[in-house]
Amino acid sequence: PTLQVAEADRARLPALWRGQLWLVAEDAQGQALAATGVQSAAALDAHYADAAEVAPLGARFDRKQTAFGLWAPTAQSVSLCLYAGPDDDAHAILTAEFDADSGVWRTALPQDLRGQSYRWLVDVFAPATGLVRNRVTDPYSLSLSADSARSLVIDLDDPATQPPGWTHKRGRRSLAAATDMVIYELHLRDFSVDDDSVPSADRGKYRAFSHPDSHGMRHLRALAEAGLTDVHLLPVFDFAT
């Protein structure tokens, strides 16, 4: 059967989603016959999606302030840990406020925090333990420290964040349509990690692509001559595994 929440109870749903929900079948005398957990993902989307779609998320800054936003509608409380650098102890913990319309937690400081690191402290209900505090990076991060340990407040358009030659535009062959692209997915590390024609210090690294006579680069040129048009590098970020 299809069950619906009574109109009078719908205002209670956001609070209920932050705890444990059970669907219980009872007999005429009110005795429990069966029970099952409730999957609320679709309900969260239906309730919050429109407002959350336009809500600013991640770290945003200007010269006057740095603001942070995290979509976590099932969290019971959220705070932000700030660090001067990726290896420093936290110098501030900011309590975030919950926006009931979007499901977003927000906090801000009246200063430009570019270059600093941060993590979220998120308290959520977990069936096994009752409550779990997660110390996590920001899913809307633009950059992370080594091993993805902390999120960074960063401006990717700042020349200080760009390696030499980053803004240099190279010409590429033109295609009449995107459907003419022949794309080769290439694992950044696997491309050269076992290639003995690449200096050992560069194997498995970006720099491996700077050796035009390596086995891998010769192979890519052969593929290009056979019709390959584009190379898609992945993954190009830290993996714990």
Image: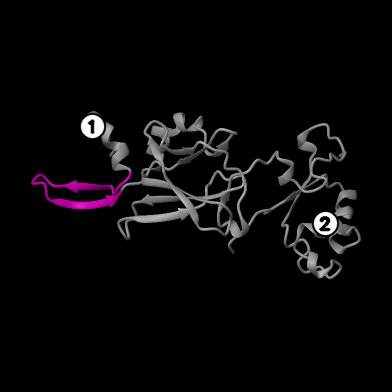
Name the spot of residue 201 as percent of width and height, x first.
79, 67
Colouring used for the render: one colour
Residue 106 place in picture, x, y as percent: 44, 38
Residue occupying the point 69% across, 53% down: 234
> What residue do we see at 20% from left, 47% from top?
25
The residue segment tinted magenta is: 18-37
Quadrant in which the N terminus appears? top left
- Circles 1 and 2: CB atoms closer than 8 Å: no
Give, as a three-letter code, the residue at label 1: Ala
Give percent across and percent down for residue 187.
Answer: 72, 57
- For label 2, the SS is helix
Q: In the picture provided, is 229 more to the left or to the right than 68?
A: right
The label on residue 216 is none
- The residues bearing labels 1 and 2 have C-alpha atoms spaced at a distance of 61 Å
Dot 1 corresponds to which residue? 6
Place residue 48 in its image quadrant.
Answer: top left
> Would you place residue 169 above or below residue 127 in this image?
above
Asked if one can make out residue 17 in the rendered structure from this viewpoint, the answer is: yes
Residue 231 placement, left or right of 14: right
Residue 56: image x %, image y %?
A: 52, 33
> Which residue is at the front of the view, 107 or 16?
107
Looking at the picture, tell me which residue is in the foreground, 119 or 138. Answer: 119
Residue at the spot of label 2: 209
Mark 1 residue element: loop
Image vertical order of residue 195 relative to residue 227, above or below: below
Relative placement, left or right, of 228 versus 21 is right
Residue 3 in sight: no
Front-most of 217 and 99?
99
Q: How many C-alpha atoms fall within 10 Å of the one at disc 2: few (<14), some, or many (≥20)?
A: some
Front of the two marks 1 and 2: 2
Residue type marked 2: Phe
Q: Which quadrant holds residue 203?
A: bottom right
